[in-house]
Amino acid sequence: MPLLTTPYAELDLIRQPDQANDPLQAFDAADEYLLQQLHEQGLAAGTRVLVLNDSFGALAASLAGQLQVTSSGDSHLARMALEKNLARNGLAFDSVPFVPASEHWQGTFDRVLVRVPKTLALLEEQLIRLQGHLAPGAQVIAGAMIKHLPRAAGDLLEKYIGPVQASLAVKKARLLTASAAGRPAATSPYPSRYRLDTPELELVNHANVFCRDGLDIGTRAFLPHLPRNLGNARVADLGCGNGVLAIASALANPDAQYTLVDESYMAVQSAQENWQAALGERAATLMAADGLAGVEKQSLDVVLCNPPFHQQQVVGDFLAWRMFQQAREALVVGGALYIVGNRHLGYHSKLARLFRGVEQVAATPKFVILKARK
């Protein structure tokens, strides 16, 4: 893999999660452009820089030891990548503080480097939260590959930060630089809420939650077919999102024990609030994590999963396949993984390579619900 070479550092970077012979690199031309732009400003060593949505730590690791940098975002995998890439390049793994998107930043910043996220609601929430965190004369510099840079990103910078200047394109990347202009205080429209009739729930969804404004059609197909009569089974909702699968299952299985896991901090925050609203003080474990990677082997009886088919803008089944493998490791012999998936993704044959029995529980014209028994 090529090294990321910028005026700040030469770094050997990896992506997360680990993938043998990964054809994709952990940085792109937008990262290079952002770092070049920052370097040309000749900032003093004490300059405080906030880095947002740094997928694999390319920006923060480059600036570590050069400027006072803080990294923040909604991805636990991004946090893991930053820590691993710092250590991989001879720096302390905790030399750059990381602030999850579910928490708040401290102090003010002179520069903010933003990788424009796929979900513009996350960008909007982050720009609103910058109120009170921008030092006099601060700039917010957002970067993306042009194919992933919607016009609305510039509109949001203009609305919440100040006048925006677009750069020339370099290697198919572009920067948007907004100068802080003391915009009027804005109230965040997030989290959003929607109601379900069956089960009867109101669900809170923070800005980066998948299908924030309504139940996604895969989950809608899955809900009527969740397993019942689980007794005191140990159940995990893998990739829990706002927690709706676990909550619906828990309401129907009052003695079961639940673990809710997602790599999005805002998803876990949403799930925590929704669990408490629906189930009060009933015990559950909720955590931002790399799936079930840290869960003890053979410690679960049931895993529920509506697997993702993309990581940022990269589409594929790598993450789903990895989740299936993690579920198999975590399940007891005789335990079961229940999933919903688009028919065309062919999950039945993939699961048959890992599990001793795979059956179709139900189907709609678009989705299948499968049960895979270990």
Image: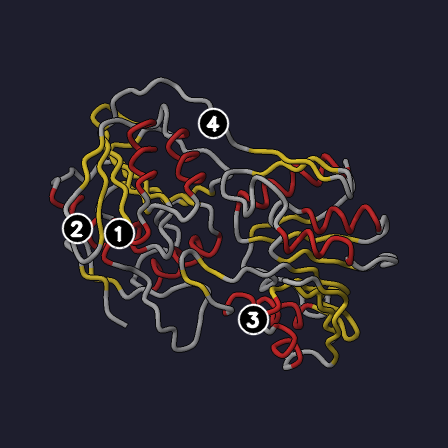
Residue placed at 53% from the left, 53% from the top?
A: 263
Q: Give the mark nearer the N terminus: 1 vs 4.
A: 1
Q: Secondary structure at mark 3?
A: helix
Residue kind at label 1, given as amino acid type: Ile
Residue placed at 79% from the left, 74% from the top?
A: 334
The tag on residue 188 is: 4
Real-space Cα distance between discs 3 and 4? Answer: 36 Å
Q: Residue furthest front?
A: 365
Real-space Cα distance between discs 2 and 3? Answer: 36 Å
Residue 371 x, y percent position in the rendering = 74, 69
Residue placed at 14% from the left, 46% from the top?
A: 168
Real-space Cα distance between discs 2 and 1? Answer: 8 Å
162 versus 347 height, above or below: above
Real-space Cα distance between discs 1 and 4? Answer: 27 Å
Q: Quadrant of the C terminus?
A: bottom right
Mark 3 = which residue? 321
Residue kind at label 4, given as amino acid type: Ser
Q: Residues within 10 Å of mark 3 (few under 14, many from 20)?
A: some
Q: Give the mark nearer the N terminus: 2 vs 1.
A: 1
Real-space Cα distance between discs 4 and 2? Answer: 32 Å
Real-space Cα distance between discs 1 and 3? Answer: 30 Å
Residue kind at label 3, given as amino acid type: Trp
The tag on residue 146 is: 1
In front: label 1 or label 4: 1
Q: Give the mark nearer the N terminus: 4 vs 2.
A: 2
Mark 2 = which residue? 169
